[in-house]
Image (cartoon, grey):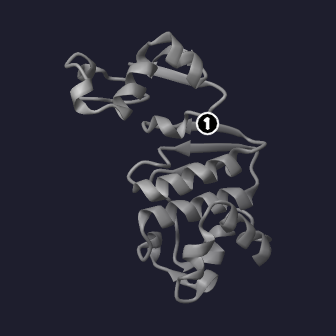
Amino acid sequence: VAMVLQEPFLFSGSVLENIRYHKTSASREEVVRAAQAVGAHDFIENLPDGYDTELEQRGGNLSLGQRQLISFARALVADAKILVLDEATASIDSYTEMLIQKALITLLEGRTGLVIAHRLATIRGADRIIVLQNGEIVESGNHEQLMARKGLYARLYNMNYASFDDISEGELELDAAVGKAT
């Protein structure tokens, strides 16, 4: 099982060591391929010493998006059969979110993924989406099925992509584990 959390765990050490964390036997080439696959390679190459750049504790000398991409590369190198993503796209800019969306396709290929997300674009391509409200399952299906039902998921999804003029006051009262609008 590999995990990518909202706040990635990075330690003092090189970028290479951080990506190899769960598989210390990984070759440099394997690390580079993983970084390329998740869209991290270019920014890593632009660091002062590339993959040998020393990171501060918790990756303090990197942006949150860069830390997330390193976490994705680490998960890919670990080659775990189950991947847990807990709010992995929260608190990042739109460009980095786009990189991570592309990385998710590569990362989840051939794996079971448990993706916990408030950004519904993160889970849109999932085979099965489970919608929780007050700790209870209220809907289940893929994106198309849930949108067709016009239930909680569809309302939350539409709120994410609608202008504020399109949202009624009642919709702003929704409270769900998948998304919370207040």
Residue at horizontal 68 percent and vertical 50 percent from the top? 107
State the count of labels. 1
**Few, some or many C-alpha atoms within 10 Å of disc 1 (few <14, some 14-19, many ≥20)?**
some
Q: Which residue is mark 1?
A: 114
Asked if 150 appears above or below 41 in the picture, the reply is above
Q: Answer with the quarter of the image where residue 83 lies.
A: top right
Residue 135 visible within the image: no
Q: Answer with the quarter of the image where residue 13 lies.
A: bottom right
Residue at horizontal 62 percent and vertical 32 percent from the top? 126
> In terms of depth relative to the viewer, which is nearer, 147 or 139?
147
> In terms of depth relative to the viewer, which is nearer, 46 or 132?
46
Residue at horizontal 39 percent and vertical 26 percent from the top? 158
Asked if 50 appears above or below 138 in the picture, the reply is below
On the image, the x and y values in percent for residue 161 come to 37, 34
On the image, the x and y values in percent for residue 124 come to 55, 33
Please state if 103 lies on the left or on the right of 165 as rendered: right
On the image, the x and y values in percent for residue 23 come to 74, 65
> In terms of depth relative to the viewer, which is nearer, 21 or 173?
173
Q: Secondary structure at mark 1?
A: strand
On the image, the x and y values in percent for residue 61 come to 42, 77
Q: Quadrant of the C terminus?
A: top left
